[in-house]
Amino acid sequence: MKGANTKLVIGRSTYLRQKRTGKAVEVCKSPYMARVVDPNDISSAQEKLIWRWVMQNAADKRDDIIFKYRQIMRKRGEFFSLAGKKELCMNVLDAWTVYLNTKEKVRSSTSPCRLFAKSIPCLYTMEHALPENEAYEVFKEAMLLALENVKPEIKMEDVDLFFFPICNPNTVMLCA
């Protein structure tokens, strides 16, 4: 039997194959979940169906709520900003950060813990020229709020990578 721990008998002597050492699989941790976010990846059939459904008929049903998590709700019309040559709605970016933070719950214990902050703190510091001490306080409060939204799943001492967006009218940059 191929692959099983078997005992081979060769003449009168016996040969025992060394026992395999297996790695224990953590319960509810999928080894197949990709944690890398690559926009060049090929979309799955399900992702394509969702994209077509969201983007069809931009003229109607813009008020349908298609994303809800705790007190955060996002309307279908906000996701139309993902279409080409449009300014990205920051609410869509925030919904994506919530999604990525919830995916961190099922990460492997050997993977680095990532925390994604919402766009709010950077909007204040980029659009309104605040004095340095005020900008620091606004940024700090927003980061603490980001941590509150993911507790108790993620603790700050466990975070290895902290991502936050810097928002400009024409550009969104994700910093680590």
Image (cartoon, rainbow, N blue to C red):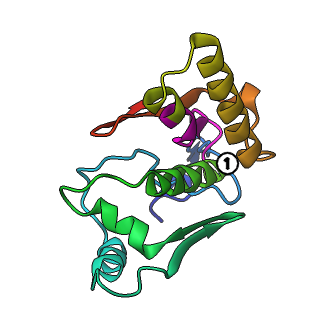
Image location (x, y in percent) of residue 91: 49, 56
Visible residue check, residue 176? no
Crowding at mark 1 (Cα within 10 Å: few <14, some 14-19, many 20+): few
Up the image or down, 11 lies above or below 82; here it is above
Tag 1: amino acid: Ala
Q: Is residue 1 left or right of residue 151?
A: left
**The magenta stretch spans residue 121:** yes
Visible residue check, residue 28? yes
Image location (x, y in percent) of residue 127: 44, 32
Q: Is residue 155 left or right of residue 75?
A: right
Magenta part of the chain:
107-123
Q: Depth check: give the residue in front, 45 or 122.
A: 122
Residue annotated with mark 1: 24
- Numbered circles on residues, count: 1
Q: Depth check: give the residue in front, 19 or 139.
A: 139
**The magenta stretch spans residue 110:** yes
Determine whether the residue tagged by mark 1 lies in a helix, strand or loop: loop
Residue located at (23% from left, 50% from top): 40
The image quadrant that residue 166 belongs to is top left
Q: Depth check: give the residue in front, 17 or 120.
A: 120
Q: Depth check: give the residue in front, 59 or 37.
A: 59
Image location (x, y in percent) of residue 156: 73, 29
Q: Is residue 16 left or right of residue 80?
A: right
Residue farthest to the top, as pictured: 132
Up the image or down, 164 lies above or below 134; here it is below
Residue located at (24% from left, 63% from top): 83
Up the image or down, 15 lies above or below 55; here it is above
Up the image or down, 169 lies above or below 42; here it is above
Residue located at (18% from left, 55% from top): 85
Q: Is residue 128 left or right of residue 29?
A: left
